[in-house]
């Protein structure tokens, strides 16, 4: 299978790595330029859309969410070069996030190719997550027909282009963070993701139901940067902390001077 490779496109006018290049793909540059994510305001996935899971059972997207904040990845199940490793990277970050799969979150992967069958979804799940374990149990690898895919990609502003010469898709490497009712809380970079970003995104998407007090503080001190699809230190809060520390230090110095003043006079 030809390898997926990379180019850049915008997410909110920001860069995201794509899983294709003109070198490997049978697509002209003009078609590759169509690939990207333009997340609509107040984006929400269609939770009633009918999908087929890796066991061949029909399920709605809402059933896959199971009332929990979730990560959603759109992947080409027959691309073994990059799509599988992206799923593995996300899975590894989830495990290191110290959140509990099936309780704090769910992982949902949906195939981009309507030709793919549940066996293809099962093969990727087995290859990247294994057959058992808490994360595998809390993950759904789903297939969709053309109509369902159109609903999903339109709701996400997600633009993929089919490369018929190689039977694969040029598509953004995005990871969507969903609230329990299907609202899109964040869109993260699939290739630059880490455990800290995933934890903060799921804590934020849970609206206080996941994580602890320390996570709330981190969310205050870290802002989401759509330019890199990650959380970065918030300059506003850093400046506030510096200001508070400086003010406390100045107040302490003045207090010491005032205490020292009467003693000097008395002597």
Image (spheres, rainbow, N blue to C red):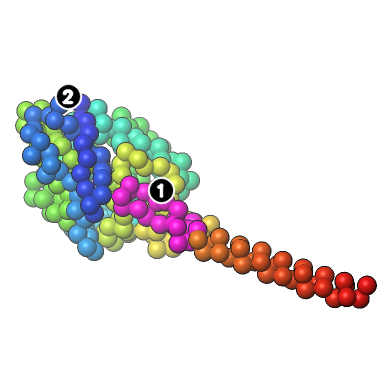
Residue where numbered disc 2 is placed: 2
Is residue 195 found left or right of 21 in the rendered image?
right
Q: Label 1: few (<14), some or many (≥20) within 10 Å?
A: many
Q: Residue 183 — which label?
A: none
Q: Residue 171: x, y in percent?
A: 18, 40
Per the model, the C-alpha gap separating discs 2 and 1 is: 31 Å
Nearer the observer, 4 or 90: 4
- Visible in this render: residue 99? yes
Against 207, residue 158 (above or below) is above
Against 211, residue 251 (above or below) is below
Residue 4 lies in quadrant:
top left
Q: Do the residues bearing badges 2 and 1 touch, measured as CB atoms within 8 Å?
A: no
Residue where numbered disc 1 is placed: 197
- Visible in this render: residue 68? no
Q: Give the quadrant of the C terminus.
A: bottom right
Residue at x 30%, y 29% (from the top left corner): 127
Q: Label 2: few (<14), some or many (≥20) within 10 Å?
A: few
Is residue 196 found left or right of 8 in the rendered image?
right
Residue at x 91%, y 76% (from the top left corner): 266
Instruction: Give the magenta part as a residue range.
Output: 218-238
Residue 142 lies in quadrant:
top left
Residue at x 31%, y 50% (from the top left corner): 227
Residue at x 58%, y 65% (from the top left corner): 244
Q: Residue 174: x, y in percent?
A: 26, 45
């Amino acid at each position: 299978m030809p390898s997926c490779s990379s180019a850049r496109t915008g997410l909110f006018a920001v860069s995201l790595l794509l899983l294709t290049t003109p070198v490997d793909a049978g697509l002209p540059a003009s078609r590759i330029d169509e690939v990207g994510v333009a997340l609509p305001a107040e984006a929400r996935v269609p939770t009633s859309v009918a999908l087929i899971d890796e066991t061949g059972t029909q399920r709605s997207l809402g059933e896959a969410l199971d009332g929990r904040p979730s990560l959603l990845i759109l992947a080409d199940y027959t691309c073994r070069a990059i799509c599988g490793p992206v799923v593995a990277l996300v899975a590894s970050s989830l495990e290191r996030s110290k959140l509990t799969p099936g309780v704090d979150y769910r992982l949902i992967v949906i195939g981009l190719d309507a030709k793919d069958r549940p066996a293809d979804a099962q093969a990727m799940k087995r290859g990247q997550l294994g057959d058992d374990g808490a994360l595998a149990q809390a993950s759904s690898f789903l297939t969709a027909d053309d109509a369902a895919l159109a609903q999903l990609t339109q709701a996400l502003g997600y633009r993929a282009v089919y490369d018929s010469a190689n039977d694969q898709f040029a598509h953004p490497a995005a990871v969507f963070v969903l609230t329990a009712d299907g609202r899109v809380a964040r869109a993260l970079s699939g290739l630059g993701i880490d455990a800290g970003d995933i934890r903060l995104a799921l804590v934020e998407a849970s609206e206080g139901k996941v994580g602890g007090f320390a996570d709330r503080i981190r969310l205050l001190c870290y802002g989401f940067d759509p330019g890199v699809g990650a959380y970065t230190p918030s300059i506003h809060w850093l400046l506030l902390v510096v200001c508070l520390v400086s003010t406390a230090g100045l107040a302490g110095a003045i207090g010491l001077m005032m205490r020292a003043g009467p003693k000097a006079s008395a002597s």
